[in-house]
Amino acid sequence: MAKIVVVTSGKGGVGKTTTSAAISTGLAQAGHRTAVVDFDVGLRNLDLIMGVERRVVYDFVNVINGDANLKQALIKDKRVEGLYVLPASQTRDKDALTTEGVEKVLNELAEEFDYIVCDSPAGIERGALMAAYFADEAIVVTNPEVSSVRDSDRILGILASKTRHAEQGKGSIPGRLLLTRYSPERVVKGEMLSVEDVQEILAVDLLGVIPESQAVLNASNAGTPVIMDENSDAGQAYQDAVARFLGEDREHRFLTVQKKGLFGRLFGS
Amino acid sequence: MNFFNYFRSQKKKSAQVAKERLQVIVARERVHRDGPDYLPRLQEEILNVIRKYVQVDEDAVSIQLERDGDCEVLELNVTLPEHRA
Ligand SMILES: Nc1ncnc2c1ncn2[C@@H]1O[C@H](COP(=O)(O)OP(=O)(O)OP(=O)(O)O)[C@@H](O)[C@H]1O
Ligand SMILES: [Mg+2]
């Protein structure tokens, strides 16, 4: 049975696409056949972050409309075995994602893959609702900042009532918090909500904390998911998150101020 | 404690302020979300009724729905303006 995972947030620009790319790559690296699907109709971006933008021929909506079959639209990743990308359409028609169409495509993907990662658009409109509707599990991406935390709480409300799972009377799908763009320096100074603060407010399990990192911009510049930058803090934090997602018990890292360089190590307290 | 430290310790860190504001707004939104659909309209109508008799602010009426086992308790709080002698 394939597992459908939605990466969602409510608020825009918090790191959903970065996370979808990293998590799907990590799952495939762990040997699971994984498809990552861009639900951001009209604002396709996952293809760029995955570095496959030049190989897009058909997209999600083409498959829904029967203009292409799934095999033609799926882009095989050249770096990681078992990883495929289904790009979003650039159409402006926001109703292109029909419930029946999305269900059909997800069912077909489920026959081939172990994990289907759905990169949700921002907001709580059709695209976001569709990305979450068929999910078995959610990763709620949140920045330590008031509007992002509030939107995450709204999304948790949607996961509890507006998914197929919930409508079948089975309650909320399990959702876990991924706190991204975290800056321990600013938390120490009292200028940023701490991971404990956010957890206390949202009251959900913590999947991971991804530090604010230059490596994320480098990765998007190159079109390489940041999890493949194994020496970077963000890359390692995403690797930990994937391991936890797969049931491993790993301690959280990058939560305290890192000593910088040799001087910091020699003369720091 | 010297003069400057006194004022510094009085000033709340911004993250603390953020946390407190979030706790309030999230709690309020959860009540509306998890409660029955009629709750917001009920709240508004009650506010209008009260305003026939006393001039109160928009946020003078707060409604809370609590579940206690099988029992649901609708808690209604109305803050009246201070009595002028
Ligand atoms: N851990 C991080 N450190 C630094 N920058 C980050 C981090 N995570 C994300 N970013 C940056 O934040 C921006 C938004 O990221 P991303 O596109 O993944 O967000 P999104 O939630 O998918 O946005 P949208 O809602 O528009 O789809 C990008 O410029 C990305 O490089
Ligand atoms: Mg995105």
Image (cartoon, coloured by chain):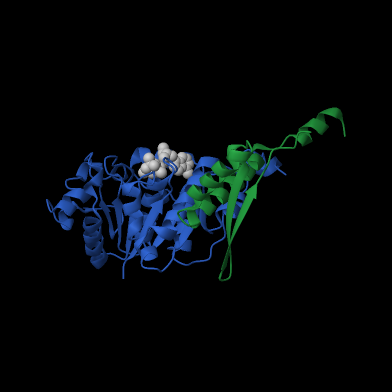
Chain colours: A blue, B green
Locate residue A103, reporting x and y percent.
25, 60
Q: Quadrant of ligand 2?
A: top left
| Residue nearest the observer in this picture, A182 or A41 | A41
Above or below residue A268? Residue A32 is below
Locate residue A21, reporting x and y percent.
36, 50
User: Relative to residue A43, is residue A150 drawn left or right?
Assistant: right
Q: What is the quadrant of the C terminus of chain A in the image?
A: top right
| Residue nearest the observer in this picture, B40 or A202 | B40
Locate residue A204, reporting x and y percent.
53, 58
Q: What is the quadrant of the N terminus of chain A in the image?
A: bottom left
User: Relative to residue B20, is residue B32 drawn left or right?
Assistant: left
The residue sitting at 34% across, 40% down in the picture is A222
Locate residue A74, reporting x and y percent.
21, 54
Give the residue furthest to the top: B3
Q: From where the camera sits, is residue A219 visible?
A: no
The residue sitting at 39% across, 64% down in the picture is A166
Q: From where the camera sits, is residue A147 visible?
A: yes
User: Relative to residue A9, is residue A35 drawn left or right?
Assistant: left
Locate residue A132: give its quadrant.
bottom left
Above or below residue B31? Residue A220 is above
